[in-house]
Amino acid sequence: MAVLGRVPLLWVSVLGTFCSAVFVSAEMWKETEVSSEAWGYVEVRSNAFMFWWLYYADNPTKQFTNLPLVMWLQGGPGASGCGYGNFEEIGPFDAALKPRNTTWIQAASLLFVDNPVGSGFSYTNSTTAFAKDLATVSADMMVLLKEFFKYKPEFQKIPFYIFSESYGGKMAAAVSLEIYKAIQAEEINCKFAGVALGDAWISPVDSVLSWGPYLYSTSLLDEEGFAEVSDSAKQVSDAVSRGEYKEATELWSRLEDVIEKNTDGVNFYNILTKDSPLTNELNFESPILEKLYLRHVNPLQKGNLDELMNGPIREHLNIIPDAVIWGAQASEVFINMEGDFMKPAIDTVDQLLAAGINVTVYNGQLDLIVDTVGQENWVKKLKWPQLNQFLKQKWKALRLSPTSIETAAFYKVRENFAFYWILKAGHMVPSDEGEMALKMLRMVTDQEP
């Protein structure tokens, strides 16, 4: 087994009474010399501790100061970026602790954060400290980021991007807007350069309404099944229109049941694979939320990854409190965010574009839960003045190298908005198409045309 021989960093913050300021004494800031990693905790609210893990860029010809900093936000809500995103997608090692050829540290320093509080190694000491909405999620992240850039000044002048996946995209959009506001108010010292929304849950209703047409067009629904799925999707849409978001969540779960029944268990994360039958391992008060959790969060922290994080990685980090088990509070994170699930965030993206923030949308061709058609549909609802010109623009084909014959993706860029269609990828683009994801990262961060 490979050994990750690095030196840990421990970081604890103390909040002011009204969370309007952060005070950190020298005694509470402990750091040792590190070569390529750092990690620690920030107390973002009373009884709420957020875990972060930084990898410095590792490039044979460039120093980390000449490459961007990328923060990765996982979905769920409740999934772990420090676990899944790190070891299953873009970190330097895979879940077997073998070096990853397509790791993003070749092109950027990587900051993984277990977010919202309670995800991964992040934890709370109180059942009332879990986030219930995007406003709290964003406020918590701002506490962490202000601390990070304060105590890691070497990153203050480096271009800073947020890349995200699934529900992490919804959170990334909200956090990006708060970063912009904090920069304008001179409350944070960083060089924010843009946000990338990967297979992002920006407009749940647009995803839901496109499931039927997408599955029918790929021969995964017959006409009768298409009609049944379409009827269930309309019920979700009607509930969202009424502002009944918890009801819409329940109807969303029932719609997924309808899809599974009619498609013989299609996988919501890659339509070319078969979904595993749900196993009831938890004791939710709500069977509907339990089913959603088992479909969309539980698979991201089971099996080898669970053993890795609670075994060798826990030992390597050497700062995880004894009472904290990786992923143990994920179900509580998911339950507490229930009221936020079906709310749209299109307006947040519009505000980012209006502020001049670079926004990238990227999506896997084979994803169902956030299918590309649904993404295109919410993009068409933007109030961005350049939208019509963007839509009229012809996309360009991307190949992995000048000698490649096969098309790996398509993309379009107009001013500060870009869209990447990633072929042969499902929901987890970097996991499915690692080379193309790395190429996209370099393009978004202006490292190649």
Image (tube, grey):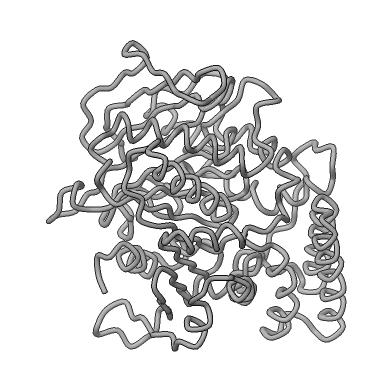
Instruction: Give x and y (percent) for residue 96.
Output: 41, 47
Q: In which quarter of the image is residue 210?
A: bottom right
Instruction: Give x and y (percent) for residue 185.
Output: 42, 40
Q: Which residue is at a point 49% across and 55% down the rendered structure image?
A: 164
Q: Is residue 16 left or right of residue 344?
A: left
Q: Which residue is at a point 42% across and 59% down the rendered structure image?
A: 357
Q: In front: 276, or 430?
A: 430
Q: In front: 207, or 278?
A: 207
Quadrant location, the N terminus = top left
Question: Outermost residue, left direction?
Answer: 61
Instruction: Give x and y (percent) for residue 166.
Output: 57, 57
Instruction: Give x and y (percent) for residue 137.
Output: 58, 40
Above or below, 316 relative to 27: below
Question: Outermost residue, front direction?
Answer: 185
Quadrant location, the C terminus = bottom left
Query: How many numbered callouts?
Result: 0
Q: Which residue is at a point 37% across and 85% down the rendered structure image?
A: 406
Q: Which residue is at a point 66% across and 65% down the rendered structure image?
A: 369
Q: Is residue 150 left or right of residue 366?
A: left
Above or below, 190 relative to 221: above
